Image (cartoon, grey):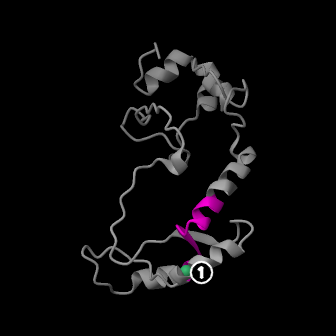
């Protein structure tokens, strides 16, 4: 992917191939960060382990409910297990759910853990000439496939409707 993006002309100031202040950049190397966040959520009673099977959840969600908009509702079968969160040494092997007090409406600003919020840049979804978003499941061409077909970076950008000067 990095090679394909570089071929396209995209450059980055930090990342797994060039290093940087916030390394490591590979998700698999950041497990300790995720584990600390999980532990913090468990310690403050924000999450609980749910041992329901997928079938249990689907059956409960498909049962008639009296929700305002008939959205499927989780039964909350495991919600009293909040104290059990501390019994787990690792988050793997069980589903974790956020604990919501009865009758409470949850609103939050996505400020994960009091960390400095980064500046985000979002670009539009890349779509084909018919307006369908490019996705592997739709057998869309990858940058690699375009390269193998001797497409130029400008040609690839034009296919996606981008100007050649990104
Ligand atoms: Zn459960």
Residue 150 at least partly seen: no
- Depth order, front residue of 151/109: 109
Give x and y (percent) for residue 111.
Answer: 47, 47
- Depth order, front residue of 28/151: 28
Give x and y (percent) for residue 131.
Answer: 36, 37
Give x and y (percent) for residue 99.
Answer: 48, 71
Q: Quadrant of residue 47?
A: bottom right
Residue 114 at least partly seen: yes
Q: Which residue is mark 1?
A: 53
For residue 132: magenta? no
Question: Residue sitting at 52 percent across and 46 percent down?
Answer: 114
Give x and y (percent) for residue 36.
Answer: 67, 55
- Depth order, front residue of 13/147: 13
- Label 1 neighbour load within 10 Å: few <14, some 14-19, many 20+: few
> Does residue 85 lie above or below 6 as drawn?
below
Left or right, 38 with reference to 137: right
- Which corner quadrant of the figure contains ligand 1? bottom right
Per the rendered image, the range of residues in magenta is 38-55
Question: Residue sitting at 61 percent across and 25 percent down?
Answer: 5
* Tag 1 secondary structure: loop
Question: Residue sitting at 63 percent across and 21 percent down?
Answer: 6
Question: Residue sitting at 61 percent across and 66 percent down?
Answer: 43
Instruction: Spot the residue most to the top.
Output: 165
Quadrant in which the N terminus is drawn: top right
Left or right, 159 with reference to 44: left
């Amino acid at each position: 992917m990095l090679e394909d993006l570089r071929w396209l002309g995209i450059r980055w100031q930090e990342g797994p191939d060039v290093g940087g202040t916030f390394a490591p950049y590979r998700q698999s190397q950041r497990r300790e960060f995720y584990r600390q966040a999980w532990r913090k959520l468990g310690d403050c009673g924000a999450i609980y382990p749910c041992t329901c099977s997928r079938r249990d959840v689907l059956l409960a969600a498909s049962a008639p409910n009296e929700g305002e908009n008939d959205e499927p509702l989780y039964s909350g079968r495991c919600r009293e297990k909040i104290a059990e969160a501390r019994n787990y040494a690792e988050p793997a092997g069980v589903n974790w759910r956020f604990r919501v007090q009865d009758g409470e409406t949850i609103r939050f600003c996505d400020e994960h853990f009091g960390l400095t919020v980064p500046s985000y840049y979002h670009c539009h979804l890349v779509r084909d000439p018919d307006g369908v978003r490019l996705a592997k499941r739709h057998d869309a061409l990858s940058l690699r496939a375009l390269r193998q077909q001797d497409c130029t970076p400008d040609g690839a950008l034009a296919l996606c409707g981008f100007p050649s000067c990104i």
